[in-house]
Amino acid sequence: MLEKLRNLRRSEPQTTGDPFVDALRAALGPDQVRYDGAHRSLLSHDASVFDGGNSGPVCYPTSTADVQTIVRLANDHGRNVVPRGAGTGLAGGAIPLGLPVVVAVTRMDRILEVDPVNRVAWVEPGVVNLDLTRHLTPMGFHFAPDPSSQQVCTIAGNVANNSGGPHCLAYGVTNAHVVALEVVLPSGDVAMLGGLEPEPQGLDLRGAFVGSEGTLGVITKVAVRITRNRPAVRTLLLSFGSVRDAANTVSDVIAAGIVPAAMEVMDQPITRAVENYVGAGYPLDAAAVLLAEVDGLAAGVDIDADRIGEIGRANNATDVRLAGSETERALLWKGRKTAFGAIAQIAPDYYLHDTVVPRSALADVLTEIYAIADRHDVLVMNVFHAGDGNLHPLLIFDGREEGMMERVHAAGAEIITASLDAGGVLSGEHGIGVEKQQFMERMFTDDDLDHQNRLRQAFDPGCRTNPGKVIPSGHSCADIQALRSIPREVWV
C-alpha cells in the first residue's frame, strides 16, 4: 500500500493549471504542497459542526523561510492565507473560505530549547501540547495550559485561540504562558513580538496576537513559560443530588478564599457515558460530580482539601472522595478529558459551546440550558470549567435526522443569548471563528468592532489572512476577501 501511495505521488502532474500552485511546488517541492481532492477536502473542515469550508492548495512548511515563501507567493498571486494547526478548533476558526492556501504547521514540531533556570522553552508551532509536558516532566516542569484536546492540539492552535483547560483556574489561560512569538506577518516579513526581558518595551503586540485566531499572521516559533511541578497534589471527587448544588459549591469555594488548581463539573448523563467509556470509578447515581484539585505544599493542600469537602457537604454533597493514589487521580482526569469522545456511544455528532458566565449565575444559566434543549427536543449534557464559569454544554445529535441541524443551531443560539443576558461573554477558550460572529454585535458596540478591525488592518492591510472570521460582516475589512472565489475547474 505504501509503495502504491509513493507511485501515485510520483505520477502527479508537474503542472496543475494554476500558476500559484505551480509556483508553490517549484519553491517548496511537491511533498510540501498538496492539491489533490483528498487533502483539500480534509483541511476544509475543523472539529466544529460548520460546513462551507473550501480549501485551495495545502502547504506543509518545515521552517520560517518556507512560511515566508508561501505568504509572499500568495501576495504575488492575490491569494488568501489560512494558518492551521491540528484542526481541533470547535468554532470554525480554521475553516478556509474562498479557496485560500492553507498553511498547515504540523511538520514544524520541534522543541528547540528548554531553559529550566529562566523557566522558558522555545518551540515550533506544530508541537503538540501534551508532548511538550511529557518532554518537560523529567526536568520537573510542565506546560500549564491543558485543553481537553491536549493529546492532539498544537501550541500554535493554543496561542491562536488563547486556550485554557481545567487548570486555567489557578494558572491562567495561554496568554499568561506566552513570552514571545516569532511570526510571519501578512507582508511576508518576520517579526518578533514580545521578548524574554521582564518588561519588553513598546506596545504589547504579543498580547494582541494571542487569541487573534490566525487573522494577524502565521506563528513560526513560540517562547512559553514552563511551570514547576508542585510537590503535593490532592484530587477530590464530590457527588451531588443536583447540578445546582455542585455549581453553588464552586461559588462557595472561591468565596471562601480558596483557589483550587481546577474545579470541573459533569452532570449525570455525561458522567454515565464517561464511566462506561473509561471505568474511572465515577458514581452513576449522582446528578452531578465535581472534580476539584489543589496543589502546593503538602500541609496547605491538606487543609484546602478538607475545607472543600466541608463546603461540599454544606451544599448537600452525598459523597466526598479523595483520590488515594496517583493512578486513581490520573484515571479521574482521564475520564474528564475524554468526555467529548465518550458521547460517541450515544450519537455520532455533537455541538459544543463555550460561553462564560459569572460564577454566581452558573446554576441559573444551567437550568435555562436544560430548558432550551427541551424546547428544541435536543439532548444536552453539561461538562464545564466550573471554577471560572466557562460552560461547555454538549448538544448530542444525529445530523442525518430530518431537521435536526436546524434545531441544534437554534438551541445553540439561545444558549449564547442566555449566557450574554446573564452578564457572560461569547468565548472562554474556543474563539469566535464563524460560530459566534453574528453575536459579536450583541457584545460589542460599533466603536469596539471598528477598533478591532483597525488593529487587524495594522497587521494585515490587505485583509488576506484568514478572512471571514471573528469580526462580523459589515464591520470587517475582510468582507470582500471572504467572498473571493476561484473557479472550481482550476482544481479539477
Image (cartoon, grey):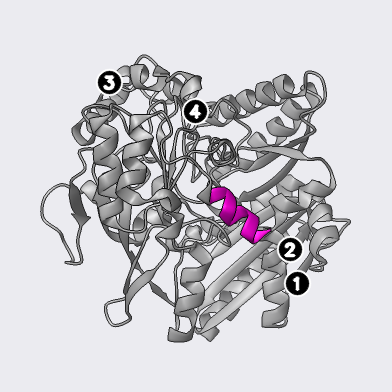
SS label for mark 1 = strand
Q: Which residue is mark 2?
A: 238
- Where does label 4 land, which residue? 491
- Per the image, the residue denoted by label 1 is 321
| Among the 4 quarters of the image, the one containing residue 276 | bottom right
Tag 1: Cα neighbours inside 10 Å, few (<14), some, or many (≥20)?
Answer: few
Label at residue 10: none
* Quadrant (top left, top right, bottom left, bottom right) of the N terminus: bottom right
Question: Crowdedness of circle 3 by 10 Å Cα count: few (<14), some, many (20+)?
Answer: few
Mark 4–mark 1 Cα distance, whole angstroms, equals 58 Å
Nearer to us: label 3 or label 4: 4
Question: How far apart are labels 1 and 2 at the CA level?
Answer: 6 Å
Residue 343 is situated, as x and y percent measured from the top left of the image, at: 78, 47
Q: Secondary structure at mark 2?
A: strand
Residue pictured at 41% horizontal, 30% vertical: 470
Q: Secondary structure at mark 4?
A: helix
**Furthest-left residue in this view:** 201
Q: Quadrant of residue 485?
A: top left
Task: Measuring from the top left, give residue 296's x and y in whole percent.
Answer: 49, 78
Q: Nearer the viewer, mark 2 or mark 3?
A: 3
Amino acid found under the numbered disc labelled 4: Trp
Q: SS for tag 3? A: helix
User: Which residue is under mark 3?
Assistant: 447
Measure how far apart labels 2 and 4 are at the Cα level. 55 Å
Q: Are marks 1 and 2 in contact (CB under 8 Å)?
A: yes
Q: Judge whether residue 8 is colored magenta.
A: yes
